[in-house]
Amino acid sequence: MKEKEITVLANENIMNTYKRFPIVLVKGSGAKVWDIEGREYLDFVAGIAVCNLGHSHPAVVAAVKEQVEKLTHVSNLYYTEPQTMLAGLLVENSFADKVFFCNSGAEANEAAIKLARKYAHEKMGDDKFELITMKDSFHGRTMATITATGQEKFQFGFTPLLAGFSYVPFNDLKALEGAITPKTCGIMLEPIQGEGGVIIPDAQYLAQVREICDRHKILLILDEVQTGIGRTGKLFAYEYSGIKPDIMTLAKALGNGFPVGAMLATDKIAQAFTPGNHASTFGGNLLAMAASYATMKTILDENIMGNCLKTGDYFLSKLKQLQQKHKIIKEVRGRGMMLACSLNIEGADIVNECMQRGLLINCTGGKTLRFVPPLIITATDVDHAIEVIDQVMEGK
Ligand SMILES: Cc1ncc(COP(=O)(O)O)c(C=O)c1O
């Protein structure tokens, strides 16, 4: 099929939930993708912080190929080696003692909300079920996770929402402390807000949130769906703060593009789940586990996070140079390879023009350009991207 045929047919048959760019992507390798007309793009979106090892990474491809030829799916009625191996790797490299596998970030957060409620129900009393989340947060699109998401635009038209959530401004400890009631069982937040515009809290914020949780004997749930798996230069962003959460959620980059989610917890909290409390047909699927294990091993063993920090710092410095030149850039910020430029104009035209010049970037919240490229990009890739953005911003 040709580009036009596909876009027309897709619009005819697929529900209208996404605003898509009019290109049809067919192939990827490393930080590059190609469309059906043969045009090449440098991909600084990476499936929105998903393909941390780049497209079609050989280790992930080999792992999935090997597994698909052996066994694809058996359900959680039985033990499998890939699921056991990945759980072991996640436990070994995090605060957690136990893992629950699912298929997406929203599902991982659903599992976290259910586990927090179940634990609270058993250990804190029936009337402790409320979670405090952050304004401008993003936790997913299911009913519980749009409720947890502190942005009305994602909730509009879907009321009534789930009971038991309240919201405070991110990075505001006074507001957080003030929002705790006798019904509060936990606080749920992203270490760096992603969809909210790559918002980095004060250096001590997470540690102080932990202290508040400890003092009130409530749970700390970290949503590392976007920040996890090396994106910020450490395996998990909480490692920067010197504290540990009680529950953490992962998805996006865990399978480097293979759909997978995980909810991790300490033993003490995890014991609130017993057989029958929670489940997923596809959770822990053999192919997802094989892809995720290969992804995790590569990230841990091949200095991917070293490159993320080094090239991420270089990228940040180059964006700061651009800020000196272009008045439309209000602020440049980020950590590792999770970077952003907030603009004083709408970002859509810039994203479109970059795409026309062979660079894929993303805009969140209308005026924030977000850069979440594969962690394997080189300084040459950064120079190329900066040159394109520079040209596009000229005269804006
Ligand atoms: C922090 C965070 N949590 C949860 C989600 C939802 O993940 P999914 O789209 O896999 O359900 C996202 C997606 O952007 C996210 O950034």
Image: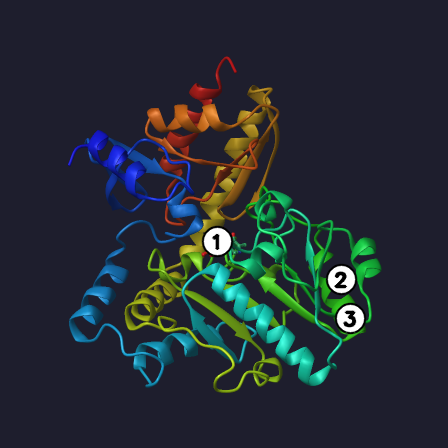
Q: Nearer the viewer, mark 3 or mark 2?
A: 3
Pointer 3 or 2: first along the chain: 3
Cα–Cα gap, marks 3 and 2: 21 Å
Q: Residue at x 63, y 73 (%)?
A: 116
Q: Which coloring applies here?
A: rainbow
Label 1–label 2 contact, CB within 8 A: no
Pointer 1 or 2: first along the chain: 2
Residue 190 visible in the picture: no
Q: Mark 1 is on which residue type?
A: Arg
Q: Mark 3 is on which residue type?
A: Lys
Residue 293 screen position, x and y as percent: 35, 69
Whether disc 3's CB lies below 8 Å from ligand 1 is answered no
Q: Callout 1: few (<14), some (14-19), or many (20+) C-alpha neighbours within 10 Å? A: many
Cα–Cα gap, marks 3 and 1: 34 Å
Q: Quadrant of residue 67?
A: bottom left
Q: Nearer the viewer, mark 3 or mark 1?
A: 3
Q: Which residue is mark 3?
A: 183
Q: Quadrant of the N terminus?
A: top left
Q: Residue at x 82, y 66 (%)?
A: 181
Whether disc 1's CB lies below 8 Å from ligand 1 is answered no
Residue 187 visible in the picture: yes
Q: Mark 2 is on which residue type?
A: Gln
User: Which mark identifies residue 231?
Assistant: 1
Label 3–label 1 contact, CB within 8 A: no
Q: Quadrant of residue 257?
A: bottom left
Q: Is residue 161 above or below residue 265?
A: above
Q: Callout 2: few (<14), some (14-19), or many (20+) C-alpha neighbours within 10 Å? A: some
Q: Which residue is mark 2?
A: 208
The number of numbered discs placed on residues in the rendered structure image is 3
Q: Secondary structure at mark 3?
A: loop
Cα–Cα gap, marks 1 and 2: 23 Å
Residue 73 screen position, x and y as percent: 26, 74
